[in-house]
Image (tube, helix red, strand yellow):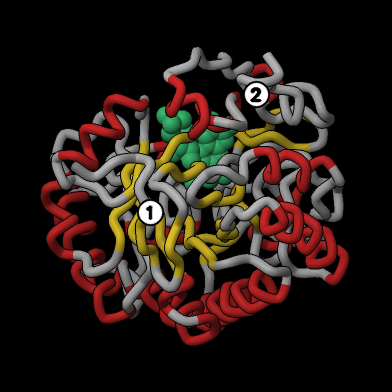
Amino acid sequence: MTSLFSTVQIGRYTLANRMVMAPMTRSRADDAGVPSDLVATYYAQRSSAGLIITEGVFPSALGKGYVRTPGIETDEQIAAWKQVTEAVHAKGGRIFMQLMHCGRVSHPSLLPEGAQPQAPSAIKAAGQTWTATGLHDFVTPHAMSVAEIAAVIEDYRGAARRAIEAGFDGVELHTASGYLPEQFLSTGSNQRDDQYGGSVENRARFVLDVLAAMVQEVGGDRVGIKISPEMNFNDISDANPQETYTYLVGQLSGLNLAYLHVALFGAKVDYHAVLRPLFNGAYLVGGGLNKEAAQALLSEGRADAAVFGSTFLANPDLPERFKLDAGLNTPNKDTFYSPGAEGYIDYPTVQGA
Ligand SMILES: Cc1cc2nc3c(=O)[nH]c(=O)nc-3n(C[C@H](O)[C@H](O)[C@H](O)COP(=O)(O)O)c2cc1C
């Protein structure tokens, strides 16, 4: 029986266990996208995870979509992230950076002077985002030209290179939650009639081009991808998600990626059964897992590793707690995105409780 506590090969790394910390935006950066000093402490506290995946990080300033989120573009940002990777590595952990370009679900006030949110098509999403002055409605985005698409692909390539420069073990492409890559994939947000829109082959092209650039830059064994079919967050919708994701995942094996991370939230299709056989790297499953559900997935051979979000947020020593069958701290939603240490680095360990 495969245990949560056994080692697992993911890309070029042998992880100490199969418990992965999910990417979670925590909004502890400054207005220049530089992570605060608290960030190194927060991730180092969670370094007993087999793998940490960071919060979504914007590859370039045009990708920022929430106030106080971090970037991986400037020298200051790279220097701050170096402290994070050094702190995690000093405690024996592994850490990938998640690259998140928000596309149309951003707001002009979060972007460089005069810039509009970018998207495959000029279709406004229903909903709002957090800016420096509170919640604001999404705006009608700027439909990207082919040259602008090429520039964003280069932004991702550069971000992957800078992440490795900052000491990260790898990078994950955020292709879920209604952000730019999923905006290209999905029929509700992509009505282009060029090589980046229309057929499923064309809608998947942006994601595959971005991944190819990242792989070329840092190697497939240091690149992962996250998808959440049918999550429908940020007003994303697709006419035939099963066809879209079957095609996309079928194309990934040629890239020899480290992992495919699939987080499901009430999808009607059993995507794990559909997608896992199509993929040749490690298969990571997330979304609402507890210890028992995660162990069952591994025992039944349905996943190679289990991804925990809010449970890891609230329990820095989650593997230790699982080992001891100890009680768990409850996540405090009020401090998920608030600035400062409270609800960030002050969750007690089982030893300290
Ligand atoms: C506070 C918070 C922030 C999140 N931010 C991100 C993010 O930046 N990128 C991402 O891919 N998912 C994000 N998620 C989703 C998680 O990665 C994960 O898929 C989700 O929480 C489900 O896992 P769970 O039920 O174990 O919490 C976030 C979740 C939470 C709770």
Q: Look at 64% across and 55% down and name the residue there.
A: 57
For ligand 1, tell me if the residue under mark 1 lies within 8 Å: no
Circle 1 residues within 10 Å: few <14, some 14–19, many ≥20: some
Left or right: 224, with 42 as reference point: left
* Side of 139 where 304 appears, left or right: left
Q: Indicate which disc, 2 or 1, sits on the residue closer to the N terminus.
A: 1
Residue 102, given in percent of the width and then of the height, sits at 57, 53
> How far across and down, in percent of the image, does residue 27 sit?
73, 39
Question: On residue 7, which mark appears?
Answer: 1
Residue lying at the far bottom of the rendered structure: 216
When asked about the image quadrant of residue 164, the answer is bottom right
**Where 161 sits versus 86, above or below?**
below
226 or 346: nearer the viewer: 346
Which residue carries the number 2 mark?
349
Q: Quadrant of residue 335?
A: top right
Give the vertical position of 342 relative to 161 (above or below): above
Looking at numbered disc 2 in the image, what kind of residue is underneath it?
Thr
Amino acid type, label 1:
Thr
Q: Are discs 2 and 1 less than 8 Å apart at CB? A: no
- Point out the image quarter for the N terminus: top left
From the top left corner, tell me how far across and down residue 41 is, in percent: 77, 42
Q: Residue at the location (68% across, 17% down)?
A: 334
Mark 2 neighbour density, 10 Å: few (under 14) some (14–19) many (20 or more):
some
Residue 8: image location, x then y, percent:
35, 57
Q: Nearer the viewer, residue 327 or 258?
A: 327
Residue ID at (21%, 32%)? 296
